[in-house]
Image (spheres, grey):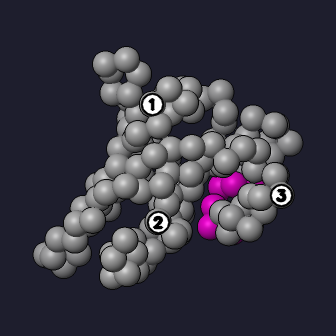
């Protein structure tokens, strides 16, 4: 990814960001708003392994996302339980970014089905001050 686009995505989404996440089940699209954080070419979300979105991503990992003058596609994958050692660094960042709601009963880290979802971007279009950035 172009460093300029990466910097713009980090500026805009390197915090608690509400984005639309679209998945497909059969021939029916499904979209929902999720809290996400952008870092290093991917969006990260905390979710439940048994949610409809995760079931749909397991069958077809290609997703669509959009928010704040950005739209794109990516590949969704579960990184497993939020307390896995491998997830420690990103979860420290997410707990801080999502602090306004994370510990208010919305997330149960003791539940083994509370997982980290990574959406690795494959392409996208970002608008800023009348300029279009495509990758």
For residue 85, the mark is 3
Q: Secondary structure at mark 1?
A: loop
Q: CA distance from mark 2 to mark 1?
A: 20 Å
Q: CA distance from mark 1 to mark 3?
A: 27 Å
For residue 60, the mark is 1
* 68 versus 46 height, above or below: below
* 108 versus 3 height, above or below: above
Q: Toward which corner of the image does residue 134 lie, by quadrant?
A: bottom left
Q: Which residue is mark 2?
A: 41
Indicate whether residue 97 is drawn in magenta. Answer: yes
Q: Secondary structure at mark 3?
A: helix
For residue 8, the mark is none
Please count the marks in the image.
3
**Residue 103 image position (x, y, % from top left):** 75, 54
The quadrant of the rendering that contains the C terminus is bottom left
Observer-nearest residue: 96 or 52? 52
Observer-nearest residue: 90 or 18? 90
Residue depicted at 41% across the width and 49% down the height: 74
Residue depicted at 45% across the width and 74% down the height: 10
User: Is residue 129 shown left or right of residue 41?
Assistant: left
* Residue 106 in sight: no
Q: Secondary structure at mark 2?
A: loop
Indicate whether residue 77 is drawn in magenta. Answer: no
Q: Magenta region: which residues?
A: 96-103
């Amino acid at each position: 990814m172009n460093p300029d686009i990466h910097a713009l995505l980090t500026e805009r989404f390197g915090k608690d960001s509400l984005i639309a996440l679209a998945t497909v089940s059969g021939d029916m699209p499904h979209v929902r708003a999720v809290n996400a954080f952008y870092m290093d070419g991917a969006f990260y979300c905390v979710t439940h392994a048994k949610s409809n979105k995760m079931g749909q991503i397991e069958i077809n990992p290609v997703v669509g996302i959009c928010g704040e003058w950005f739209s794109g596609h990516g590949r969704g994958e579960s990184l497993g339980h939020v307390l896995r050692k491998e997830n420690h660094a990103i979860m420290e960042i997410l707990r801080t970014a999502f602090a306004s709601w994370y510990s208010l009963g919305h997330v149960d880290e003791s539940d083994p089905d509370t997982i980290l979802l990574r959406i690795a971007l494959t392409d996208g279009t970002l608008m800023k001050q009348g300029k279009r950035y495509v990758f």
